[in-house]
Image (cartoon, grey):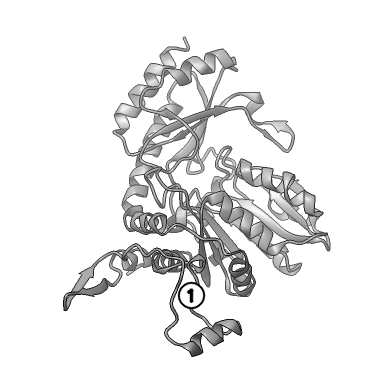
Amino acid sequence: MDKHSKLIGLHDYSDSHGGYKIRTINPKIQSGSTVLFECYEDMQLSHQGQYSGVTYGTGGLSTQKAFEKAMCSLENGHSSHAFSSGINAIINTLMAFTRSGDEVLIVDNVYGPTARFCQKILTKYNIKITHIESSIGAEINEYINDNIKMIFLESPGSNTFEIQDLDAIVQTAKKSNIITVIDSTWATPLYFKPLGLGIDISIHSATKYICGYSDVLLGCVTVNKKHSKEFDEYRNTVENYTNAHDCYLALRGLRSLRARLKAHEQSAYEIARWLESVEIVDTVIHPGFEAHPQHHLWKRYFTGASGLFAFTFKEKYSEQKIAIFMNSLEMFGLGYSWGGFKSLAKAKQYKRNGEDVHQGKHLIRLNIGLENTQDLIEDLRGSFSKLN
């Protein structure tokens, strides 16, 4: 039995009322500020920093703990912590492990707000930020120096979908005692296990596939044993509280993740293959396709694909033409984020390492939701016709 199956069949939760035991298959949503000690002696242990239990609501109550326990199990980690959003999880990881004088290497395809926080906030505290190639591997050696504290990765990048050679990077990082962190949201813990590759910290925006309904903001950080104590101490100091109801919804989302993710994956593959046959489409950017530049790495590290990919047009259309295409979509919403039941589309020109990606063409990113696949294809077909 795998860990996701165990998660679905997790033991029941019980309470009592009127002399009767009430058993449910989901935890109750527990909220509160004050947490009562069992006895005076426990309170004294807390004063001395020797109490292992929760002492205040900001430490996370039972609903949050249940979600963190489930994530830690799926990630094969030592400890997991929930945060109020994906970017909040990223920010706290960066803050926990860096100090003035450090240098952080970040791949060029990281989530935009990640790069923005590094450039606008971390640099204020004398932390140097160096962008490295989105598909970097053994070349990481060229960037190593005594000041580098962390390498921040994202595979695949959630807009341009490059994948790093993680084995080569981990090997180099361990030799130099550099912390490795990866934003692993695209594949979820079901299709990718970064800690098993030797990466130290895995981050997920649970907002996306884990929650699945575009109604929750939540992030999670899972840490290996080596760095768990340091991160635990940081989190206890900053007292980041995560809403209990959001943790409940995330835990509920984990129960159905496998079924939903499989549906996203299959529908995305079908639509991506159809796009390859469309005359005006140039490149379909999907890590699961052999034509993807790092497909061999995808096959090495991942056991499945999610529903997020992109494509470009053969012609370099103007902003006005792209607007016509995007505005004529009926089933695809125009919005940020991804991983939910609603299909979404986004169009943008990207630069990587200072150079235009795909000759400066607009990259059309699709989040394939849970609608009927043929209906989504017909919606795209109709919008393509507007470009003629």
Say which residue appears at 40% left-offset and 67% top-offset. 66
Residue ID for mark 1: 54
User: Across the whole image, how many numbered discs are drawn on residues?
Assistant: 1
Task: Tell me residue 215's x, y (percent).
Answer: 40, 44
Does residue 81 appear in the picture of this structure? Answer: yes
Compare residues 381 and 112 and report the one nearer the observer.
112
Q: Quadrant of residue 230?
A: bottom right
Task: Tell me residue 53's x, y (percent).
Answer: 48, 79
Figure check: 384 above or below 134: above
Task: Tell me residue 44's x, y (percent).
Answer: 55, 87
Does residue 166 appear in the picture of this structure? Answer: no
Give the left or right position of residue 238, taking residue 64 as reference. Answer: right
Say which residue appears at 50% left-offset and 35% top-offset. 336
Task: Tell me residue 171's x, y (percent).
Answer: 68, 64
Crowding at label 1, few (<14), some or many (≥20) Cα neighbours within 10 Å?
some
Name the image quarter holding the N terminus: bottom left
Q: Residue furthest bottom?
A: 41
Compare residues 96 and 53 and report the one nearer the observer.
53
Say which residue appears at 43% left-offset and 17% top-offset. 384
Give the left or right position of residue 367, taking residue 232 as reference. Answer: left
Figure check: 200 above or below 115: below
Amino acid type, mark 1: Val
Give the left or right position of residue 99, taking residue 196 as reference. Answer: right
Secondary element type, mark 1 = loop
Q: Quadrant of residue 360?
A: top right
